[in-house]
Amino acid sequence: MSTARLEYNGNSWEFPVIEGSEKELGIDISDLRSKTGLITLDEGYGNTGSCRSAISYIDGDQGILRYRGIPIEQLAEQSNFMETAWLLIYGWLPNEEERKGFSELLTKHQMIHESMRSHFQGFPNNAPPMAILSAMINALGCFSPEVLGYEEGEFNFEESAARLLSQVRSIAAATYKMSIGQPMMYPREFKYCENFLHMMFSVPHGRYTPDPDVARALNQFMILHADHEQNCSTSTVRMVASSGANMFASCAAGVCSLWGPLHGGANMAVIQMLEEIRTSGICAKDYMEKVKQKDSKLRLMGFGHRVYRNFDPRSRILQKTADVILAKLNISDPLLDIARHLEEVALKDSYFIDRKLYPNVDFYSGIILRAMGIPLNMFTVMFAIGRMPGWIANYKEIHDATRLKISRPRQIYTGETKRDYVPREERG
């Protein structure tokens, strides 16, 4: 085994170098503090491996994303969301018996408890959908007490995973219906994505019939968002799960993390940027010139990624999907034209090329959701539904570990040194 040497203050220590299955190298500093009295400082964790995981793999330089070893391009083209969910959670593509059994569990648990329907009335109509989603996922555990423990014999993981995957879409659709003053729709005998579209857009006097191409596009959207290594929300799920918290509480925490505009809200920001460009009347080239100015406050949303230093492979897939959906629905969206012009300018301009600012997954996903009729404030909810299999897979990976170890980062304290308490009458 190769090692790395640390030298400090005349002392020297060696630490093992760990090699992943894709030849990634990392220095194992698990014993750093006990050996040296030192800790590392890595704000934002950009250089810190928090775990060993077998779920998804990214090569940002090459623009590669794989789920359990399978390229995302193959899954987006050939798989569906539920098959991909099984792959992420269990590590292999389901055989016919597993696929059928899991599908039956999803159908069995697709309806939320009737008592939960009244909970939605406790929220104001303008409540943020992500706040409702997080609260209601936690509430699911109250109606399914068997999910609250992971002890052998008391917890059916597969059934609980199916319950969460199935009901998260029912909660999301009910949240939307409540916000527009329409009655919540019960699920029907549709496939996963078709059923969600039905619950979103059907009304009692008029059933929505999901278009196959729209359902396929939604399947692709969900697959492309299903997992992405140790991003902020997934790391949050693992952190909460490490305490022994149940699956629903852990995934509800993931929803709260995803809610942040720097994470799950990025696709909303793209649409808002495109709208601003459209209403201002500025052309794409001039907008990009303003972005490049040193003192400019304009931001180019949907370009660049903290991990990818090449094209986000998901954006290439969604670009083609956007073309298909807008043509199928006969939608002429000026925002798509603006998006294409921005991309064309960026890919020819050395300023963006040198900084590796390529379109990412958020760049086209918002346009696709918009074409489907998904309102802007539901975009992050859609992201959460798609990411749920990855969160569940990471939860399972934590609890399947030989020994459950609670996550407990260290810190470098920068506050006041010891000082005495000042009585109230002496504080002036």
Image (tube, rainbow, N blue to C red):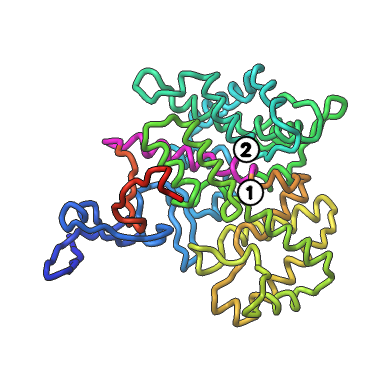
Q: How many numbered discs sit on the rendered protein?
A: 2
- Confirm whether residue 425 shows in the render: yes
Q: Is residue 203 left or right of residue 245?
A: right
In the structure shown, which secondary structural element does the residue marked by tag 1 occupy? helix
Q: Residue furthest right?
A: 205
Residue 102's spot in the image, x, y percent? 53, 28
The part of the chain drawn in magenta is 381-404
Q: Identify which residue is drawn at 69% across, 59% down.
A: 270
Amino acid type of the residue that numbered disc 2 sits on in the rendered structure: Ala
> Does residue 44 lie above or below 205 as drawn?
below
Instruction: Report the front residue among 271 and 365.
Output: 271
- Residue 197: in magenta span: no
Residue type at numbered disc 1 = Phe
> Where does residue 343 sit, x and y in percent of width and height?
68, 70
Disc 2 is placed on an element classified as helix
In the image, 96: left or right of 399? Answer: right
Left or right of residue 306: residue 400: left
Q: Which of pointers 1 and 2 indicates the residue nearer the eye?
A: 2
Disc on res. 221 = 1
Q: Is residue 91 visible?
A: no
**What secondary structure predominates along the stretch shown in magenta?**
helix
**Residue 97: horizontal and vertical position, in percent?**
49, 28
| Separation of residues labelled 1 and 2 (CA atoms) | 22 Å
- Classify the position of the N terminus by image quarter: bottom left
Point out the residue furthest to the bottom here.
Answer: 350
Taking the magenta stretch, the answer to whether it contains residue 397 is: yes
